Structure formats: C-alpha cells, structure tokens
Image (tube, rainbow, N blue to C red):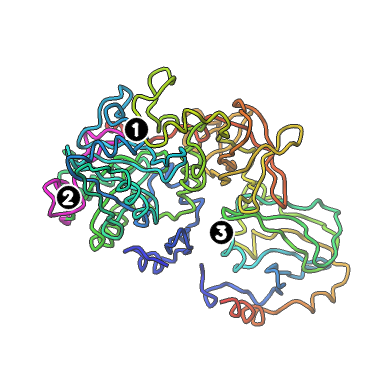
Amino acid sequence: MKRTPLFERHTSDGASMKEFRGWDMPLWYPSGAVAEHRAVIAHAGLFDTSHMSVVEIKGPGAFNLLQKCFTRDLRACVGGRKDPLIPGRSAFGAYLNEAGWVVDDTVVYQIDSQVYVSIVNAGMGETIASHLIGHADGEQVEVTDLTGRVGKIDLQGPASAKILMKVLDNPLQVLQDMEYFAFKGHFAGEEPYARTFLTDGTPILLSRTGYTGEFGFEMLASPDRLPGVWHMLLELGRDLGLVPCGLAARDSLRAGAVLPLSQQDIGPWPFVNHPWPYALPYNADKSAFTKTFVGDDALKNSENAEFTYAMVGFDPRKVSIHDPARVMDEEGREIGLVLTCVADMAIGLHGGRIYGMTGPDRPRDFTPKGLMCGFVKVKIPLAPGRTVELRDEKRSIKAVIVEDVRPNRTARLPMSEML
Amino acid sequence: MKRIEELNLPMAVRYAEDHEWVRSAESTVIIGISDYAQDQLGDITYVELPAVGDSFERGDEFGTLESVKAVSELFMPMGGRVVAVNEDLGETPGLINEDPYGRGWIVEIEPSDVREMDALMDARTYREMLRGFE
C-alpha cells in the first residue's frame, strides 16, 4: 500500500488507518468521525489528500487539448456570469470517453496562458495523462503525471481563513479578494508562479475550493514540506477548533453537500441525468452544449441513460452498498441501485424539515441526530419528494429523492464574512 | 484503532466471542459491547433495541448498532427476558463509544440459566482471543 508524506504523523496520532484505492489512509482519528464531521461545520478540519493525483498540461496546445477533453467550456466557466477561465481561476468538470462515460472528475487550474494543472482522483494520474496524450492529435502539448511529486492538504470549515491568517506570509493580501474557485501561487518553488508562501517559507498553491461543501481551502505543496505544514496548521489552528479529519468525515461531508465520488457516483455510464449539470458546457436554456468535446455525441444520444438522484433518509440508518443495495419503488419493483449511502451527522429532521446544527433558524435546543444520505441510480425519472425504499441483505430503509441535503453550507460565503 | 494492550477490558465483566460483555446485577445481568467492539465499529450513530419483555435464547440477534462504518448485529451472550433497555442511547448513541461498560450499557435481562455465564470468557482469555486476530 502507498503512504502519503503524513503517514507517520497519522499513525502516531492514533488514526484508524484503512486502504483506499491503494493508499493507506486515515479513516478517523481518536476523536471519531462524527466529531470530525461536526468540527468542519462549526470550526475547521484538516484533511490529508495527498493520495490524489496531479497532472500538468503545458504548451501552446494545452487550451485546445483541454477544450477537447474537459467537460467545461474554458471560454465560459467562471462564476455566475460564465466568464472565460483565466490564470488564478479553476473549474470543476470531468473527462469522458467516447461513450460519454466518466474516466474521472477533476478541478482544472489555469496557471498561465499555456499552463494548466488538473487534480484528479487517487491512482488516476497515469490514466488521465495517457487519456489526454491519446487525444492530443499533433497539438504541441506536454502532459506530465506529477503523482508523488505534490502533497495536498485540505483546510475546510468556517474558521479556515482565520487559521490561514496565522500561517500565511502577507495573509490579508493573499486572502481578501479570493473568490470561490480562485487560487494563488504554485507548489514548486522554482516556478515563476510561486508567489504565495507560508511563514516558514513553503511555497504553496492555495485554492479556495474543497470537497466538503463548506468554506475552505486546498493547499498543494512539495511532499517534503508537508509534515511541517500539517504540524504548523494543527498547532496554530487548535484554539480555533481545528481538528485532523479522516476519510469517513470527508465522505459524509461531501455526500451531505451533494458532491459525487468518482468511480462510485459517476463512472462507466453516460454522464447525464445527474445532480451535476454545472459540470457540463450547457448553453443558457440547457438545450445544447456550447462546444464539442470527447463524449458529447454519446451524451446527446443517451435516451436510455439512467437517472442519478440525491436522496435522504429519516434517521442515520444506512444500507450497505457492497451487498449491493437495491432501490425499490412504492410498489416494490426494483428500479435501480444505491451508489452512496452514508450519514450526515450535522443535520436532523424537525417537523418534516432538515435543519443544520449551525442553521440560524434551527429550533431551540436542536441537537442533530444525523440523517442517512447519498445517491441512487434508477431506470426511471423520479421527482423530488418521491419516496423510495433502499434494500440490502439485512434491511429496508425509506428514503426521499431530494435536490439538496445539508442546509446552510458555507462554501460560497463572501471572504469578508470569514476573515 | 487501539492496540490490544491499550484496550480497557475490566475484570468485573465476562466476555462473549461476539464482543458483548455481561455483568451480574442482583437477579439480573447487564449486557453491553466491549471496548474492542466500539473501537472497531467507530462512532455509533443509531441503536435498534428490543422491547422490554422480549425473550431471547443465547446467540439470538437482539438488536443492531449503526456506526459510521456499517450496521452490526447484537447477539445475546445469554438467554433471558429483557427487563430494561438503555433509553439514553436513543438520544445519545455515542455513550457506547464514550463509556462502553458504564453509561453505554445496552440491555438488562433476567437470565433463563445463570450457568450460561460460565461459558463466557474472563478478561485475560478475551484479550488472548483478540491477540489471535492481530
């Protein structure tokens, strides 16, 4: 099993370790996954995400190659106004094959006019690099899998900016104008783009993104600097409620935020009829794509494609997706499969409505008991509010099809409120 | 996970192979899960308990524990009739993680045959069994 630069720190801090896609990763720390999940909602959490892969796309043909393979239109993917991607901005999307199936999802960062960095999932660096090279068709472009040459730490939660104020060089200058999906700096000190540093001199790529639905940042740095960065963040963030978090909290936070896990919620089936239309280059009325790209024809001709929906239960009880768990309609007919089934332990039901543990309108003395949530893939379209039954080998659980799960998420709050 | 030598395994209770513990009260016995079990499961998020008055044989499933990881069945270490269940677990299932031998107890039963207790392990034997899993 592969180990991140923080492996020794995780084990000496008593983390429960588990294999995830070939990596030995912390599942939770001694405080437990529920406390970690709730810390990210109320304060902040620190995640080792160095298992993820980084691919660099460089050269005069980089724009054309990404425009051909990435599911976002680089000329129209920034903010609500759909501005062009520019240096210092990133966009979430996917790489598809000719059948319209997801090879992997990614955030693409534009470093310079001819330099892009694409962060993909654990173990996918090589796959995506060869996928891109295979579509380069004579374009002048260099694609490099940087797996193992970049470390990554995610700092997530409403206290994240206040914690960064303590560890960044020139913190206000770095943070104050930073919008959602903006980034600064570079992880390689020798690069001319390395202009953002921590107080210990570590060059970082600091990005206002994450995988929790909450306000926060992702940080890329050289692997040899990572243990020092992790230690400094935990030491200086402790009084603001920062705790180290494992993959269990990451999974439950992202599911409550209706974010997909690649190879589980998106994968070898057409990338349509899902809760992530923003990852596709639709025009304003969603009648067509604004560009052509690998897989687009298959998506346009996918009349028989299945439907993926977010769902939420009535308490934290789950089914096992490994059994696998089936989805049944009200008449007991099997209509599909459960893709993700976890419990968001920062929310609860009250009077038929979902409240969050920090929601300003939550009932008096509200304590979140947690709700099962996740995704289902079904053969027939289902409207929000429809009830389905999830059935594994042991039990049956009722769930409701929804458009959103955890309320009051902080990811998009203005920086001025978070400093 | 805790190392075997770090586990809290009190001498005052007896242990079943399925990681439940049993403690004698006056004419009843109290049942819960061991420190090893709660550590393996991770945070308990929901508990399904039997009703007071339900009767079980030794080895019967009497409830489930939902953790962040999975759902696990609870098996009766001894046969008997349920005389009390820990109602606090409905509101605070995490008591099982915090205090598995105290406030995290699960059910109290009137045993049908107290001699079934003799088949359970003492702390030392249980710890030896756990070492075998490593």
Q: Amino acid at mark 1?
A: Arg
Disc 1 designates what residue? Answer: A72
Q: Is residue A269 left or right of residue A409?
A: right
Q: Nearer the viewer, residue A310 or A137?
A: A137
Q: Position of residue B16 (x, y in %)?
A: 72, 72
Amino acid type for the residue under numbered disc 3 = Gly
Label for residue A197? Answer: 2
Q: Say which chain tag 3 marks.
A: B
On the same chain: label 1 and label 2?
Answer: yes
x 55%, y 76%: residue: B4
Q: Please state the chain letter of the residue tagged with numbered disc 2 in the rendered image.
A: A
Q: Quadrant of residue B56?
A: bottom right
Q: Which mark is residue B42?
A: 3
In this rendering, position of residue B63 left or right of residue B101 = right
Distance from Cα at disc 2 to Cα at disc 3: 37 Å
Judged from the image, the secondary structure of the residue bearing numbered disc 3 is loop
**Mark 2, other Cα within 10 Å: few <14 / some 14–19 / many ≥20:** many
Query: Of tags 3 and 1, which is closer to the observer?
Result: 1
Query: Per the image, is A191 magenta?
Result: yes
Tell me which segment is drawn in magenta: A175-201
